[in-house]
Image: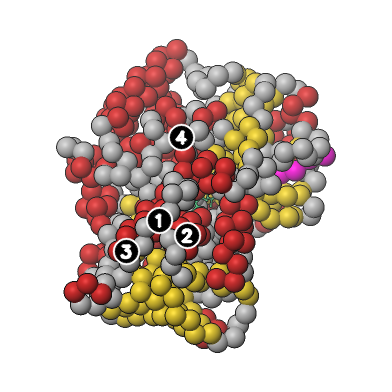
Amino acid sequence: MQHSHHPVELDVDVVVVGAGAAGLTAATDLRRAGLSVVVLEARDRVGGRLHTDVVDGAVLEVGGQWVSPDQTALLATLDELGLTTHPRFREGDSVFVDADGTRTRYTGEVLPCDPRTEAEVSRLTGVLDALVAQVDPDRPWEHPDAERLDRTSFEAWLADQTDDEQARVQVALFVAGAMLTKPAHAFSVLQALLMAASAGSFSHLVDPDFILDRRVVGGLQQVPLRLAERLGGDVLLGRPVRTLRWSAGEGEDGGSVVAEADGGAVVRARRAVLALAPVLLPRITFDPPLPLRQQQLHQHLSMGFVIKVHAVYDTPFWRADGLSGTAFGPHELCHEAYDNTNHGDARGTLVGFVSDVRADEVLALTADERRERVLESLAHYYGEQAKHPVVYYESDWGSEEWTRGAYAASFDLGGLHRYGADLRTPVGPVSFACSDLAGLGYQHVDGAIRMGHLVAERIAAELAVPVPVGAAR
Ligand SMILES: Cc1cc2nc3c(=O)[nH]c(=O)nc-3n(C[C@H](O)[C@H](O)[C@H](O)COP(=O)(O)OP(=O)(O)OC[C@H]3O[C@@H](n4cnc5c(N)ncnc54)[C@H](O)[C@@H]3O)c2cc1C
């Protein structure tokens, strides 16, 4: 990796913009295919939304971290890079806090509620699983009822399905607060179905033992770090791309690009891979401008927003109380929380999430008030001891210039069926790759890796170079 602010001019086959999991996967495959590659990264580090930070001696995964069994592209990459995983700690009782603050210990994946609500949640889960089974995560807009499903908000659909408010709150919790990190009135049923289909089923989304199954020893940022290490000096840090000049070329030639980044970096290439969150694409000046369709579709995508909070204690005190650390409270400030103790660490770490409108609400407070409110919420789950961590940390991706939200981008109402089919369509020599464009693994590292492989394969084929067997798939 190179960090320099000196002017540099390079000629390569492919310029990759963004050194997250998608960009580095694409660059790795392209290089394996015998093509020359340069990666231009805006930040002073690689990994994008994967980042391990050390805060007052505590090692914290402040971005993406969990791996689930369906994420086969990510699992193949972990294998290839020699990375190992460990299960999320889950021995003991989970905790549920309801609207009036009553705390209930429970086991299994069904949140405690009265039998009628439990039956309604189970029925809704069945309805959603059946709908999800009809959705191809790579082409949700091809569902026969796509338009209607995309014009209806998830909130309105739930209201139409059941008059049991608690059942609606529980189902919305797993799609809105826990996944898309937008209020349920702000995204469509089709978008919710894509989210679930990308993980195999709706039942997978509501089961933390599936979707939050394992973590990587040493942190998930090891993936981009190791990929970048292999790419060596071809990864240039601190080089935000401001302008992309492109020409579609004529006939077979397929065009060319010139990427201009800070510090006088100019990279001429036959192809470009833009591997960044699609909401950031309008920050790049395209010359000539992107076609109308792309200009429009990028305006119909927006990032969700969630604050990931870590609290580190001298010991994982909740375990002594027979608690697994897994906690849900749809009406709590932290709607979900988990034991996030690092592998082999004697200290105990809790992670909690404050999503969408609640994140807006707490961000209007001072840092001290915010900390107090968040720890109060954790204390509702784990008791008074939760109020006294030795390290407290909030990761606010919304303020990060090169991400601007968390976890990822999704369409507004109606946007998915209207524009989704063009999300990944290349424009002349310019291709797009990101977890937020994925089908399987959508909004997850697995999807980022899949998109990286996909664009690399297409570009290698276009430039008539076979991708060798052995490239992780
Ligand atoms: C708090 C949080 C928790 C998450 N939890 C999980 C989880 O547990 N499991 C999971 O699988 N996923 C999780 N995710 C999602 C996952 O981290 C992302 O889906 C994935 O890392 C995205 O990878 P990417 O390469 O597509 O995009 P990014 O990681 O966003 O990478 C894009 C890169 O492009 C760079 N860039 C942007 N603009 C420019 C420019 N103009 N010029 C040059 N470079 C530019 C950025 O700096 C960045 O490095 C989480 C995300 C967050 C934020």
Label 1: element kind: loop
Check if mark 1's residue and mark 2's residue have beta carbons within 8 Å: yes
Which numbered disc covers residue 467?
1
Which residue is denoted by mark 4 in the rendering?
70
Q: Quadrant of residue 354?
A: top right
Q: Which residues are magenta?
A: 309-314
First in sequence: mark 2 vs mark 4: 2
Query: Looking at the rendering, which quadrant does residue 174 occupy?
Result: top left
Report whether 201 appears left or right of 91: left
Which of 443 and 125 lies nearest the eye of the viewer?
A: 443
**Position above or below: 470 against 125:** below
Crowd class of label 2 (few under 14; some 14 to 19; many from 20; radius 10 Å): some
Q: Which element is circle 3 on? A: loop
Badge 3 vs badge 1, beta-carbon distance below 8 Å: no
Amino acid type of disc 1? Val
- Answer yes or no: is residue 209 visible: yes
Task: Residue under label 3, please give it.
Answer: 464
Q: Amino acid at mark 2?
A: Arg
Task: From the image, state whether disc 4 or disc 1 is nearer to you.
Answer: 1
Calculate the distance from the C-alpha at mark 2 to the C-alpha at mark 3: 13 Å
- In the rendered structure, which amino acid carries the disc numbered 4? Asp
Expressed as whole percent of the image width and height from the top left, the position of residue 48 reads 54, 59
> Principal SS element in the magenta part?
strand
Q: Position of residue 432 (x, y in %)?
A: 36, 61
N-terminal-most mark, 1 or 2: 2
The reply, left or right, for residue 85 in relation to residue 59 is: left
Of circles 3 and 4, the one toward us is 3
